Amino acid sequence: MSNRQATVLGGEPQSSDVFSFEAADVTGTYRVVADDVQRSLPAGAVAQALASRMSLPENVPWGLRDDSTSAFLNDEQPIGDQIEPGTSVTVTPKTHLGGW
C-alpha cells in the first residue's frame, strides 16, 4: 500500500476562516492533509478538489465521510459547519446501489 502525503487546498491563512483536517481515499492508498481550507466552502467542492489532488477518477462524483461518526457530509453545506479542525475524513465515491 502506498501512503502518499501532500498538502492540498492551501493558501494564506486568514484567521479562523480556515482550518485543517486529514483525508484519505476509500482504499487507504492516498492520505493528505488539507491545510488552510476555507470553512465556508461547500463540502462537495472540497471533496472534488481532494479527489483531484489524489488523482482519483474525474468522472466519478465524490463525497466526504467523517471517520469518527461514519456520517456523510452534505455536499451543499459549508465544510466548516460539518467537521472540526483535525477531523479525519474519507473521500468516497457516491454510489447508488439500487433500490425499489
Image (spheres, rainbow, N blue to C red):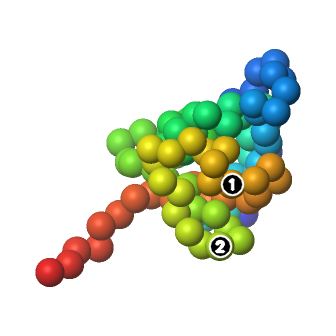
Q: Nearer the viewer, residue 98 or 15?
A: 15
Label 2 Cα neighbours within 10 Å, binned few <14 / some 14-19 / many ≥20: few
**What residue is shown with label 1?**
83
Q: Nearer the viewer, residue 98 or 39?
A: 39
Where is 10 relative to 52, above or below?
above
Where is 85 relative to 46, above or below?
below
Q: Amino acid at mark 2?
A: Thr
The local secondary structure at tag 1 comes to loop
Q: Residue at x 14, y 81 (%)?
A: 100
**What residue is shown with label 2?**
69
Residue 62 picture location, percent across and down: 46, 50
Label 1 Cα neighbours within 10 Å, binned few <14 / some 14-19 / many ≥20: some
How far separated are the C-alphas under marks 2 and 1? 10 Å
Residue 4 picture location, percent across and down: 76, 48
The local secondary structure at tag 2 comes to loop
Q: Is residue 30 left or right of residue 92?
A: right
Q: Is residue 83 left or right of residue 96?
A: right
Q: What is the quadrant of residue 7 in the picture?
A: top right
Residue 86 picture location, percent across and down: 82, 53
